[in-house]
Amino acid sequence: MKKEKKTKQWVLRLSFATCLIVLAVLIETIGMHPTGIYSYTNEGYKDFQIGLSKKGVLRQINLQKTMRAIQTCRPVAVLKKTSRKKLKMNDNLDSSDIWVSYDRTGKQFLFFFKGANLKRILIQRLRFGKKKGSALFLDCTAARIKDIDHYLKTQEKLNVFLGDGKRIGKRQMLK
């Protein structure tokens, strides 16, 4: 009798563990964002709203505990958090219209400003190991492309999605 009970408990534990593993795999493959570049031009991404000022974007970056560095283009400069102190607006941030921010969770943000307001956000998500990312996020010369929509549609090797998760097809234009 005791052996039957122990066997039933062991089978129950094994089936429970198997169900948990299957659930984790399903969440990872279905519930997570696929690898690619996400373009936000209308509403923005979470607290980074389109139309937000540079100071407002910097404030939101400072509120994100996982965002620790900002690279600016024109002039090229890198600002890093080395302590708990927040990043402060300086001349490089104020004069640059392109910011690249790196997140410790694996996302990379590319902020495009027109004047003093946020115009567009590109987010690169790389999953399942160290995949080669887009050239847009690696250096400032690639990020300064005049027609970013055309580049994303024709030359980008990663999948490009609109902010709502729809994949950009060959015949669709980015907004």
Image: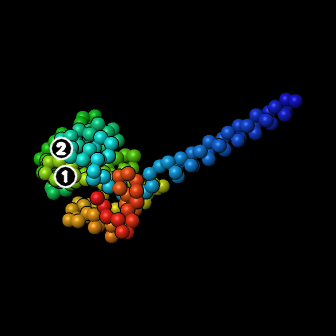
Residue furthest to the right: 1
Can residue 159 be seen at all in this image of the molecule? yes
Question: Identity of the amino acid at label 1?
Answer: Phe
Q: Position of residue 27 (x, y in %)?
A: 53, 47
Of label 2 and label 1, which has the lower sequence position?
2
- Give the structural element (helix, strand or loop) at label 1: strand
Q: Are marks 2 and 1 in contact (CB under 8 Å)?
A: no
- Asked which quadrant contains residue 64, the reply is top left
Give the number of marks: 2
- Can you say which quadrant of the picture contains the N terminus? top right
Q: Position of residue 51 (x, y in %)?
A: 20, 46
Question: Identity of the amino acid at label 2?
Answer: Ser
Question: Which sits in the foreground, 52 or 79?
Answer: 52
- Asked which quadrant contains residue 11, the reply is top right
Residue at (65, 43) in percent of width and height: 19
Q: Is residue 108 left or right of residue 20?
A: left
Name the residue beneath numbered marker 1.
Answer: 113
- Give the structural element (helix, strand or loop) at label 2: loop
Q: Is residue 28 left or right of residue 98?
A: right
Q: Position of residue 20 (x, y in %)?
A: 62, 42
Residue at (28, 67) in percent of width and height: 150
Can residue 71 be seen at all in this image of the molecule? no
Question: Which sits in the foreground, 105 or 116?
Answer: 116
Name the residue beneath numbered marker 2.
Answer: 53
Q: Is residue 48 left or right of residue 89?
A: right
Residue at (57, 49) in percent of width and height: 25
Crowd around label 1: few <14 · some 14–19 · many ≥20 (10 Å): many
Question: Which sits in the foreground, 16 or 137?
Answer: 16
